[in-house]
Image (cartoon, grey):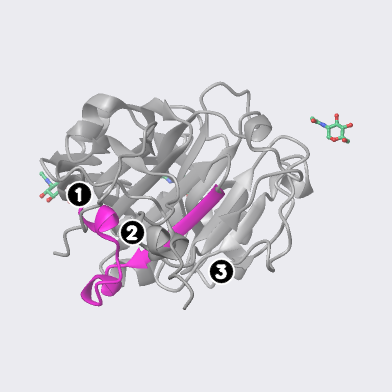
């Protein structure tokens, strides 16, 4: 009789090989945004009809509103825009801190929707100058769009493989050249799943976006609608980051998270270290401009973009971000040894 094989038994007892593990570095929830992000009053670099206001103005006009567990940023929806001014009052904020390799989770209840809007949650190199160090657009869209467009904008020599074995994802690639000098800074985009943007996203009660970035994984993104929570399809580290962190649990963005909707592999055709460094995050909401304005005539929206922005404040009542939390995980230097406790399930 042959002896029983030993190695498979040992392998079965050893913890399964795991992907990169993370620890919760920062949790931005409610009023913590007010002290850890800056309100940018710059002229919109994308030429929108927008007047970005400072924190004091935003709070005074209730364009920024925070409770212990909610953070709201909105456009003005009460006043006609005076002729000769920059445009409709709105908010653009930048995180004080920058993050390199990381795993972010954004729990969002509502995002801006409606004709003329162009909203984005994205990150850019703290060092720059743009596009050096890269730009990662996590959420972006315009006008009546309902599916999110995620995209990268980089310095030269960053190209993504065509979808296939090297790039399996549920989303649809819209272009593969990330170089910002190519095609008027089109970027390399991936159109995301149903319910991932604006009206459809909001009607479903919002949801969660997660983005992982690192030299071995490249950049990968997941999305879960709030509707998926009922089916328990949302990982605990996404749904309950504070509970998971308090329990000492370490998410890993592994196969349990399901297939990403967007995958941007890095390697020979797009070196990670050459194209991506530490990024600060931005939430913004502009109107018309280079994208929403140019796309407006074919968007199904009424009249002209600037007339809507200037003269129809009532069209902007849904033009707001409502954030439940933004959680940034960073890599654990020393992976803990097993056994690994299960994540809480409720
Ligand atoms: C400010 O906005 C918040 C969030 O939408 C709302 O709950 C609150 O009633 C508003 N406050 C005022 C004074 O309008
Ligand atoms: C702005 O100018 C236009 C054209 O001159 C005029 O029709 C409109 O009433 C003005 N709007 C305001 C708010 O003054
Ligand atoms: C891009 O790649 C080409 C060919 O390898 C090289 O000549 C060029 O210097 C690279 N450009 C940058 C900005 O790295």
Q: Quadrant of the C terminus?
A: bottom left
Check if residue 222 falls in the magenta segment.
Answer: yes
Residue in the image at 59% along x and 51% along y: 151
Mark 2 lies on residue:
13
Measured Cα–Cα span from mark 3 to mark 1: 42 Å
Specify start and end residues of the magenta stretch as a single range.
Answer: 218-241
Membership of 127 in magenta stretch: no
Q: Which mark is residue 267?
A: none
The front one of 266 and 333 is: 333
For residue 169, above or below residue 86? below
Choose mark 3 or mark 1, whichever is in front: 1
Q: Is residue 77 left or right of residue 191?
A: left
Is 345 drawn above or below residue 112 in the view shown?
A: below
Dot 1 surroundings within 10 Å: few (below 14), some, or many (20 or more)? Answer: many
Q: Residue 326: horizontal and vertical position, in percent?
A: 29, 44
Work out whether residue 91 can be spotted. no
The kind of secondary structure element at disc 1 is helix
* The disc label shown at residue 299, or none: 3
In this orientation, does residue 294 appear?
Answer: yes
Looking at the image, tell me whether mark 3 or mark 1 is earlier in sequence order. 1
Between 83 and 7, which is closer to the camera in this rendering? 7
Query: In front: mark 3 or mark 2?
Result: 2
Query: Which residue is denoted by mark 1 in the rendering?
Result: 244
């Amino acid at each position: 009789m042959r002896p029983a094989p030993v190695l498979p038994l040992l392998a079965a007892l050893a913890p399964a090989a795991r992907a990169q593990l993370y620890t919760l570095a920062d949790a931005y929830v409610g009023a913590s945004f007010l002290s850890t992000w800056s309100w940018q009053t710059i002229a919109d670099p994308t030429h929108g009809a927008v007047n970005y206001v400072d924190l004091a103005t935003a709070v005074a006009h209730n364009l920024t509103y925070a409770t212990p567990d909610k953070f709201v940023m909105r456009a003005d929806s009460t006043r006609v825009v005076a002729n000769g001014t920059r445009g409709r009052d709105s908010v653009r904020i930048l995180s004080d801190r920058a993050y390199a390799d990381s795993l972010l989770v954004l729990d969002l209840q509502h995002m801006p929707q409606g004709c003329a809007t162009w909203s984005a949650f994205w990150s850019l190199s703290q060092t720059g100058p743009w596009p050096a160090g890269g730009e990662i657009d996590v959420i972006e869209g315009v006008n009546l769009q309902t599916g999110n467009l995620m995209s990268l904008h980089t310095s030269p020599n960053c190209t993504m493989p065509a979808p296939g074995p090297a790039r399996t994802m549920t989303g649809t690639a819209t272009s593969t050249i990330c170089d910002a000098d190519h095609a008027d800074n089109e970027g390399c985009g991936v159109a995301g799943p149903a319910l991932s943007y604006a009206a459809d996203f909001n009607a479903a009660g919002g949801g969660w976006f997660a983005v992982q970035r690192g030299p071995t994984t490249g950049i990968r993104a997941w999305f879960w609608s709030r509707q998926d929570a009922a089916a328990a399809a949302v990982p605990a580290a996404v749904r309950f980051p504070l509970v998971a962190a308090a329990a000492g649990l370490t998410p890993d963005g592994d196969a349990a998270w399901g297939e990403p909707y967007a995958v941007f592999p890095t390697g020979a055709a797009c070196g990670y270290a050459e194209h991506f460094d530490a990024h600060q995050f931005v939430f913004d909401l502009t109107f018309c401009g280079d994208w929403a304005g140019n796309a407006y005539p074919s968007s199904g929206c009424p009249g002209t973009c600037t007339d809507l922005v200037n003269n129809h404040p009532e069209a902007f009542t849904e033009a707001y971000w409502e954030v439940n939390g933004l959680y940034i995980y960073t890599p654990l230097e020393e992976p803990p040894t097993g056994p690994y406790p299960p994540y809480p399930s409720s």
